[in-house]
Amino acid sequence: MLNVHHFLALLYLTLFFTFFFTRCSKDEEKIIPEEKFVEILSDVMIIDNLAIGQNDKIALMVRVFEKHDISSKQFIQTKEHYQKDAEFWIRVYYRTQKRIKEKDTL
């Protein structure tokens, strides 16, 4: 038979794991998939190399984030998530460069 202490311990554990797994899944939802990140990063790099003022670049980046239906926070979280994953950045770098070259030929 469960006494009050066992019941409260079980309740706390249930709440802890519910919070933990909910928190983890929400954080994972904020990470942008690699293919989409390549598209976004390509647009960001093109904007970054434009000969326009910083305020105009920021305005264009806001439009890029809106176009891809992400927030700047998601973009930053994705960069932070993959910060130490060298293989990810190598793949993304080459795919981004290829995508920019393809856009240049259009």
Image (cartoon, rainbow, N blue to C red):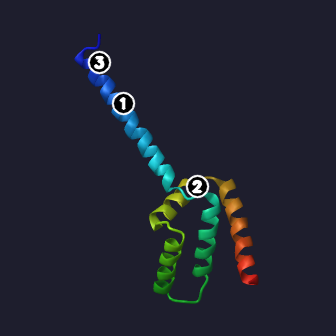
Q: Position of residue 13 (x, y in %)?
A: 35, 28
**Residue ID for mark 1:** 14
User: How far apart are the two marked residues, 3 and 2, measured between alpha carbons?
Assistant: 41 Å
Q: Residue furthest bottom?
A: 52
Q: Residue at (45%, 63%) from the top-left corner?
A: 73
Q: Position of residue 69 (x, y in %)?
A: 50, 68
Q: Secondary structure at mark 2?
A: loop
**Residue ID for mark 3:** 6
Q: Residue at (68%, 69%) from the top-left corner?
A: 96
Nearest to N terminus: mark 2 or mark 1: 1
Crowd tier of the residue under label 2, counting other residues whose Cα lies within 10 Å: few below 14, some 14–19, many 20 or above: few
Nearest to N terminus: mark 3 or mark 2: 3
Q: Nearer the viewer, residue 53 or 20?
A: 20
Residue 82 tag number: 2
Which quarter of the rendered picture does the N terminus lie within? top left
Q: Residue at (49%, 73%) from the top-left corner?
A: 66
Q: Position of residue 42 (x, y in %)?
A: 64, 72
Q: Residue at (48%, 61%) from the top-left corner?
A: 74
Q: Quadrant of residue 86?
A: bottom right
Crowd tier of the residue under label 1, counting other residues whose Cα lies within 10 Å: few below 14, some 14–19, many 20 or above: few
Q: Secondary structure at mark 3?
A: helix
Compared across the picture, whether 82 is left or right of 86 comes to: left
